[in-house]
Amino acid sequence: MTRLDPIESKARVGKLVGNRAIVIGAGLGGLAAAMRLGAKGYTVTIIDKLDVPGGRGSAIWQDGHRFDLGPTIVTVPQLYRELWAACGRSFEDDVELRSLDPFYEIRWPDGTTFVAQHDTEAMRSEVAKIEPRDVAGFDRFLEDSAKRYWFGFEDLGRRSMHQLWELVKVLPTFGMLRADRSVYAHAARRFRNEKLRMAFSFHPLFIGGDPTHVTSMYILVSYLEKQFGVHYAMGGLAGMARKMADVVEDQGGTLLMDTTVDEIVVEDGRVRGVRLESGLELGADVVVSNADAGHTYDRLMRALPKKRWTPAKLKRTRYSMSLFVWYFGTKGTRGEWADVGHHTILNGPRYTGLLHDIFMKGKLSDDMSLYVHRPSVTDPSVAPEGDDTFYVLSPVPHLGHGGVDWSTEAEAYKAKVLDVLEDQLLPGLGSKISTEQVFTPETFRDRYLSPHGAGFSIEPRILQSAWFRPHNVSEEAEGLYLVGAGTHPGAGVPGVISTAEVLAQLVPDAVT
C-alpha cells in the first residue's frame, strides 16, 4: 500500500491531469466509491486515519490471530461482481467466497434452538419444532419478504432518493406494504410464538436498528438470505478491502493512510478539496465523504452555514445503538466445542424489553443477547494451528444517552459476557483465552469518529430512511457526495456497497 507523507501527497496530487477526486475514509463504502470513480476516469486519493483499509471492516493482528473487527458475512454477491465488472475486473479472481449452510444458529436459555439454513423445507421443520401452527405464517412471511426485497432493495436501494418527488411517487407502495409497521410488529402478525418472532425480526440489529421501531421494509433480509445465501470471504472482509484497495491503486489512485481530514474546503458554494489536520490543503474537483454523515456535517463542514443538516437537526437525529465487542483467541481448542459453528446467537431472557433498555432508556442491562463469531471453523488462517479466533458482540446503548463510564465498566461487563458464554456455549472458556482485545462505544467514537460511538451511524427508522436520510449528493455544497452507512440506502455491507453504485449515477464522468 502506498503511504505518502502530506508534503509528498501534495506534490503528487498537484501533478494530476484531469478531474481529481478525494474520498474521505477507506471503509467499504469509500473503497467502492473510489473504484466507481476510477472507472469513470477520475484520479482518486483516499484519505483515512487508520493504517489499513476497510474502516469498520478492517482487522487487527495480535499474537498470531486475525481479528476481523466488523462485518462477518457477505450477502447479495452479485453486488460485488457488478462492482468489479464496472472496473473491468473479475470479483472471483480476487476474492474467494465460501458458502455457509447453515447460516447461523439461534439459542435460548431454556435450550430451544433454531437453525437458519438455505433449504425452505428444512426451515419449515425448524419452525414446526418450535410451533407447528406457525408454519403457514412462515410461508406468508417469506412472500412478504420477497415483495419488500424487490421494491426496497432492487428498486429504491439502487437509485438516488435525493429528490422529494421520488419519495412522493412511492408513497402508495409504502402504504400498501405497511412500511409504517415495525419489523417486530410484522413478525408478530405472522408468528404466534415469541421465539419465532425474535428469529424473524432481529436482523435490523445488524444495521443498527431497533426491530420494534424500524420499518418493516427490512424483513427483506429473510428473502435475501434464502435467495442468495450467506457467505464468508476467505481472508475476512479485511482481505476483501485490501483487494478493493488494490483495484484503486491499479486504476492510478492513491491511498493516504494514517492521515486525518480536518475540514472539507468550500468556496463560493463548491468544494475545492480538503484540509488535513497538519494544515495542508489538497485540491479536488469532487469530494466524497465516507465519514459518518453526522461527523461530515457537524465537524468537517463546521464553518459552513447549513441549509438542511444544521447542528439543531443533527442533535434531533436518532443514532443506532453501539456495541461492546470482545475479540479473543483460545489455545488448543480447534477440536473443542464441536457444536459451536461459525455464527451463533445467544438470546437473553428478554427480547423486546432488552431492546427498549438499549434504544429508548439508554440503559446498560444486567442481561444481554450475544452474537458469537467463530471464523476459525471456516478459515484456519485466522488463528495459529490448533487454536481458535472468536469475537463476541453485545448491543449496548450509544454514548449519547450518558450514564455509562466504559473506562470503569468494560471489565465488569466482559466478566458478565464470560459468564454467559461459559454457561450457555463455551464451557471452560476462561482458562483457554490466550489473547484478547475489547472495543467499547468509546472505541467506536475514537477509532471511527462515530457520533455518540454509534455502531451503524443514523438509525434506519422510516423518517430517517430514503429521502429523509442524508442524501448521496449533498445539498450543502456542489461537488460533495456521501457514501457509507449514514446515507441512502443505509448500513450493512450490501447497503454501503450500494451507496457507491448510487454515487456513480450522480457523479458525471471525468473530463480529461
Image: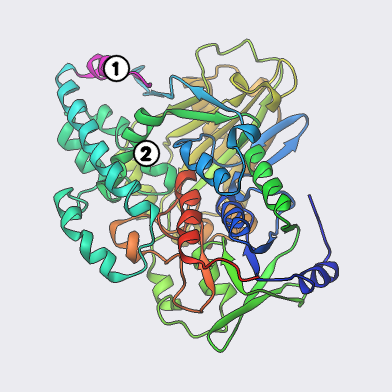
Residue identified by numbered label 1: 126
The Cα–Cα distance between marks 2 and 1, rounded to whole angstroms, is 18 Å
Q: Nearer the viewer, residue 98 or 366?
A: 98
Label 2, secondary structure: give it.
Answer: helix
Q: Are marks 2 and 1 in contact (CB under 8 Å)?
A: no
Residue drawn at point x = 55 percent, y = 66 percent = 509
Which amino acid type corresponds to the residue marked 2 in the rendered image? His
On screen, residue 240 versus residue 83, left or right, reads right
Is residue 143 at least partly visible in the picture? yes
On screen, residue 316 versus residue 330, left or right, reads left
Could you say where residue 306 lies in the image, as x and y percent from the top left? 46, 82
On screen, residue 435 versus residue 285, left or right, reads right
Q: From which residue to which does the magenta span run?
A: 113-131
Is residue 348 at least partly visible in the picture? no
Q: Which mark is residue 203?
A: 2
Q: Specify the quadrant that holds the C terminus.
A: bottom right
Could you say where residue 109 lies in the image, as x and y percent from the top left? 37, 23
* Above or below, 299 relative to 179: below
Q: Is residue 122 magenta?
A: yes
Residue, far bottom? 268
Q: In the rendered view, how is the structure colored? A: rainbow
Q: Nearer the viewer, residue 115 or 494?
A: 494
